[in-house]
Image: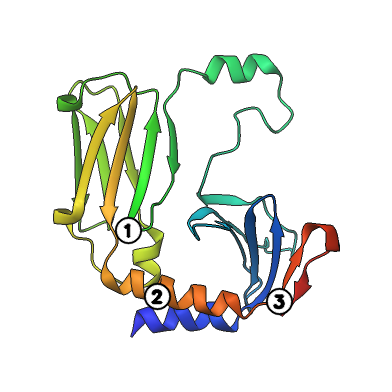
Amino acid sequence: MAVTGWLENLRTAEKTALLQDGRRKVHYLFPDGKEMAEEYDEKTGELLVRKWRVKSALGALGQWQMEVGEPALPGAGGLGPEFIKENKANPIFMRKDTKMSFQWRIRNLPYPKDVYSVCVDQTERCIIVQTTNKKYYKKFSIPDLDRYQLPLDESVLSFAHANRTLIISYRKPKEVLEAESELQKELKKVKTAHSSDGDCKTQ
């Protein structure tokens, strides 16, 4: 079963863990050279950050690609403050999960709730957000469901709008909740360094 397959990949990956600033940071190195880094709230166990990095064909390390968590500030690559200012009003898309749901937030969307349409595209296995005034369009996948090879179900999709932010929620299937619970048990076995210990230890 695909759920067990991905869980097994996580189990067999080389893992290091570090406790720092109230966050449990876990780094995974997979046999194919891909890296995944996750950060969990130490008290609640809630996933705060997940990002990926792959090597280029020449073996150079690529940039980290954010999957869950705050996106990097526009202009963080050394561009001037005028670049940040210019982009301040643009919609900002980020994923911030809860225990029971995958959740995305799109900030700087001032239109009323009835302008938005949020639906599942089964053919492309993605969620589509669009406005009737044609001012915004976004298409995004749920990598977790792809990794677990689970179908998308529009009946568990919902959205709300408040403070110029569109919040889209997709209730996690029981298979994902069970797999996440198993992973947390697995991570408890990984020796965790504390930030004062210097480098984190490898399992």
* Label drawn at residue 11: none
C-beta proximity under 8 Å, tags 1 and 3 = no
Colour mode of the rendering: rainbow
User: In which quadrant of the rendered image does the N terminus lie?
Assistant: bottom left
Looking at the image, tell me whether mark 2 or mark 1 is earlier in sequence order. 1
Type of amino acid at the residue the image marks with label 1: Met
Other residues around mark 1 within 10 Å, as few (<14) / some (14–19) / many (≥20): some
Which residue carries the number 1 mark? 100
Rendering coords of residue 106 (x, y %): 38, 33
SS for tag 2?
Answer: helix
In the figure, residue 146 lies in which quadrant?
A: bottom left
Type of amino acid at the residue the image marks with label 3: Lys
**Left or right, residue 79 beside residue 198:** left
SS for tag 3?
Answer: loop
Q: CA distance from mark 2 to mark 3?
A: 21 Å
Please name whichever residue, 168 or 194, is drawn nearer the observer in this view of the structure: 194
Which residue carries the number 2 mark? 179
User: In which quadrant of the rendered image does the C terminus lie?
Assistant: bottom right
Q: CA distance from mark 2 to mark 1?
A: 13 Å
* Circle nearer the viewer, 2 or 1: 1
Rendering coords of residue 73 (x, y %): 60, 31
C-beta proximity under 8 Å, tags 2 and 1 = no
SS for tag 1?
Answer: loop
Which residue carries the number 3 mark? 191
